[in-house]
Image (tube, rainbow, N blue to C red):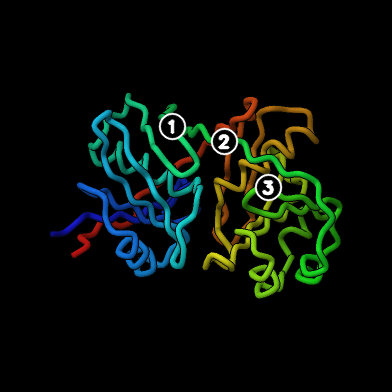
């Protein structure tokens, strides 16, 4: 048998920007070992695997090149984009996913894909020595949620210039570390970068799930529910965020750059 596999640049309005994700729609559930091997072959931050359900929704799982993860924003956005653009769902229909992080929903709003995700607020925690040793920047805040550490640094320039010690980050045992600061650019509220060497992603270009922590963090600091975040990686990408109680609506665009047959 063969399957069509796509590569989609998510949180991007042009090719070769944002965060690339693999998307593979299967007729039935595949062995976990096979999906992990395909994700390693794709060698992008995450590859998403979807299986249609009788109720019109989809089971959705995400794999980095080395492990399965519980939540991934950009590959969910890429998956919804493929469902609509490749005719698996009418554009007027919502994409409904069953995942390890519960039910997720995506919908089209003009040219923007909106996604209803769980809020993942961080709790202030004193940093372990290994965390401070991993960075060449001082922290004004450190905290973590069930997945990641979040650290705030002095400003946008500090976020852009940080060069962490990746082996030290991997040894911390969390999925990754979010580095953030208030934005100094018009039209943006905050900037961030995300490092996850422990799951096979040294630096992720644009991380939707990290904004499930960033949005409530900056919403509380800035006193506003609607925010715009920019992930200042080499590729870069914009994530629109709206905090709604224990949920966060993330918004972005996507572009398909590759369609191939997986043999």
Q: CA distance from mark 3 to mark 1?
A: 22 Å
For mark 2, does the 10 Å Cα neighbourhood hold few (<14), some (14 to 19), or many (20 or more) residues? many
Q: Tag 1 or tag 3, which sits nearer the N-term?
A: 1
x, y percent for residue 99: 43, 42
Q: Tag 1 or tag 2, which sits nearer the N-term?
A: 1
For mark 1, does the 10 Å Cα neighbourhood hold few (<14), some (14 to 19), or many (20 or more) residues? some
Quadrant in the picture for residue 37: bottom left
Q: Is residue 23 left or right of residue 229?
A: left
Q: Tag 2 or tag 3, which sits nearer the N-term?
A: 2
Residue at left offset 67%, top offset 38%:
215
Q: Is residue 48 left or right of residue 153?
A: left
Dot label at residue 22: none
Q: Which residue was labeled with disc 3?
A: 145
In this orientation, which residue lies closer to the viewer: 52 or 74?
A: 52
Q: Is residue 73 above or below residue 259?
A: above
x, y percent for residue 78: 40, 46
- Find out whether the residues at labels 3 and 1 contact each other: C-beta distance under 8 Å: no
In this orientation, which residue lies closer to the viewer: 208 or 108?
A: 208
Dot label at residue 105: 1
Residue at left offset 76%, top offset 70%:
134
Q: Which residue was labeled with disc 2?
A: 118
Q: Is residue 28 left or right of residue 199?
A: left
- Find out whether the residues at labels 2 and 1 contact each other: C-beta distance under 8 Å: no
């Amino acid at each position: 048998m063969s399957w069509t596999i796509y590569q989609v640049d998510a949180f991007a309005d042009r090719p070769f920007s944002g965060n690339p994700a693999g998307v593979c729609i299967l007729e039935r559930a595949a062995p976990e070992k096979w999906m992990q091997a395909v994700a390693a072959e794709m060698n992008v931050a995450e590859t998403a695997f979807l299986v249609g359900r009788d109720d019109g929704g989809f089971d959705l799982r995400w794999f980095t090149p080395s492990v399965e993860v519980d939540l991934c924003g950009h590959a969910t956005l890429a998956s919804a984009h493929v469902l609509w653009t490749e005719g698996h769902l009418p554009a007027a229909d919502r994409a409904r996913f069953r995942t390890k992080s519960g039910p997720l929903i995506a919908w089209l709003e003009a040219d923007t894909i909106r996604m209803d995700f769980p809020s993942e607020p961080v709790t202030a925690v004193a940093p372990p020595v290994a965390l401070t040793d991993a960075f060449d920047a001082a922290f004004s805040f450190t905290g973590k949620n069930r997945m990641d550490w979040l650290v705030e640094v002095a400003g946008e320039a500090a976020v852009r210039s940080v060069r962490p010690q990746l082996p030290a980050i991997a040894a911390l045992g969390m999925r990754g570390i979010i580095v953030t600061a208030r934005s100094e650019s018009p039209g943006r509220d905050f900037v961030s970068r995300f490092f996850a060497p422990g799951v096979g992603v040294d630096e992720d270009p644009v991380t939707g799930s990290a904004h499930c922590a960033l949005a409530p963090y900056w919403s509380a600091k800035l006193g506003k529910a609607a925010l715009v975040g920019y992930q200042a990686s080499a590729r870069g990408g914009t994530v629109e965020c709206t905090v709604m109680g224990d949920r966060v609506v993330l918004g972005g665009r996507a572009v398909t750059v590759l369609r191939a047959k997986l043999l």
